[in-house]
Image: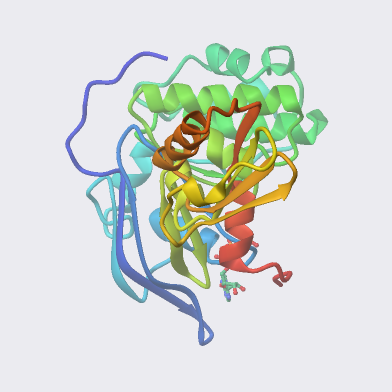
Amino acid sequence: MTSRTPGSAQPAVRLEGVVKTFDGVRAVNNLDLLVEQAQVVALLGPNGAGKTTTVEMCEGFVRPDSGRVQVLGLDPIADAGKVRARIGVMLQGGGAYPGSRAGEMLDLVAAYSADPLDPDWLLRSLGLEDSRRTPYRRLSGGQQQRLSLACALVGRPELVFLDEPTAGLDAQARLMVWELIDALRRDGVGVLLTTHVMDEAEELADQLVIIDHGSVVAAGTPSEVTSRGAEGQLRLTAPAGLDLARLTLPDTFRVFESTPGTYLVEGPIDPAVVAAVASWCADLGALIHDIRVDQRSLEDVFLELTGRELRG
Ligand SMILES: Nc1ncnc2c1ncn2[C@@H]1O[C@H](COP(=O)(O)OP(=O)(O)OP(=O)(O)O)[C@@H](O)[C@H]1O
């Protein structure tokens, strides 16, 4: 992918206090969201949390009741023509003529762009080089999915919206899509993606935004989100019967010997805690056999924040 010249300092997406209500139900409730250029932001949330509504407001398909939506510094409804020429939207299985061939479809979309990417390069990057002449209806679900991603990207957008880009893809195809998203970021493109796949969000995103009932419940880098307020655990294996009274940690920590020679420290584990434990052992002349910090996974945090019940 060729590198683009740096654009204006406008963020790719900025939402401020956005509200959208359907039939008395607040789908989006006072939402703030920021996607900078050259940044991948993953929007996470349980079913019905308001992700699609949020993205559709950014794409100019849904009008907010109140608040401000800006895309590349423009209003996506008032400036729809200008905005659509500069963004890429991945539509799930939509907009295809079933009889047209994969390569023809991509060429057609490319023909609408002033400066398209090379369609053959895109097909290769997505493992579709052998499907150029295959009619759309004969493509597998995963191939159709990748073709719709190619169509979203071929116009060299400054910002792309990806709705569950790897849903239903096999491991190889998923990796290709991840690599392509990484290449987009390197090329200065802003990416707002929705996903239900936690490791995808952790792997790809610079920033995570978890929403529930239309509002942000957590936001930050993946490590900020997984460590924020986290009760972690440090597990230490060392000689049995060490004097715990000589380990000085704040009262917020719970320290105990769970079985002879296995010590647990529960609380917000940070590098200073690990150092304190190591120096406690050193002062006692005790050799550490094993030390491990168990961090919560993004899935743990997600379920804690959004509950475990099934949503409609
Ligand atoms: N056009 C509409 N008319 C009525 N209600 C709607 C409409 N679009 C969305 N909603 C409601 O708004 C809420 C948020 O829906 P939305 O599709 O934005 O959630 P989502 O986070 O994308 O969910 P999912 O993960 O299931 O795709 C839901 O309660 C949904 O039923």
Which of the 4 image quadrants contains residue 57?
A: bottom left
- Residue 307, how many percent across, how many down? 64, 69
Q: How many marks?
A: 0
For this rendering, which residue is in front, 248 or 65? 248
Vertical arrangement, residue 146 with respect to residue 191, above or below: above
Vertical arrangement, residue 287 with respect to residue 228, above or below: above
Residue sitting at x 63%, y 48% = 264
Ligand 1 in which quarter: bottom right
Q: For this view, does 11 lie left or right of residue 35? A: left
Q: For this view, does 194 lie left or right of residue 83? A: right
Residue sitting at x 40%, y 28% = 185
For this rendering, which residue is in front, 26 or 64? 26
Colour treatment of the image = rainbow
- Residue 107, how many percent across, how many down? 54, 22
For this rendering, which residue is in front, 204 or 235? 235
- Residue 240, how many percent across, how many down? 70, 39
Q: Confirm whether residue 288 shows in the render.
A: yes
For this rendering, which residue is in front, 96 or 28? 28
Which of the 4 image quadrants contains residue 39?
A: top left
Residue sitting at x 71%, y 72% = 312
Q: For this view, does 253 lie left or right of residue 144? A: left
Residue sitting at x 42%, y 47% = 224
Q: Quadrant of the N terminus?
A: top left
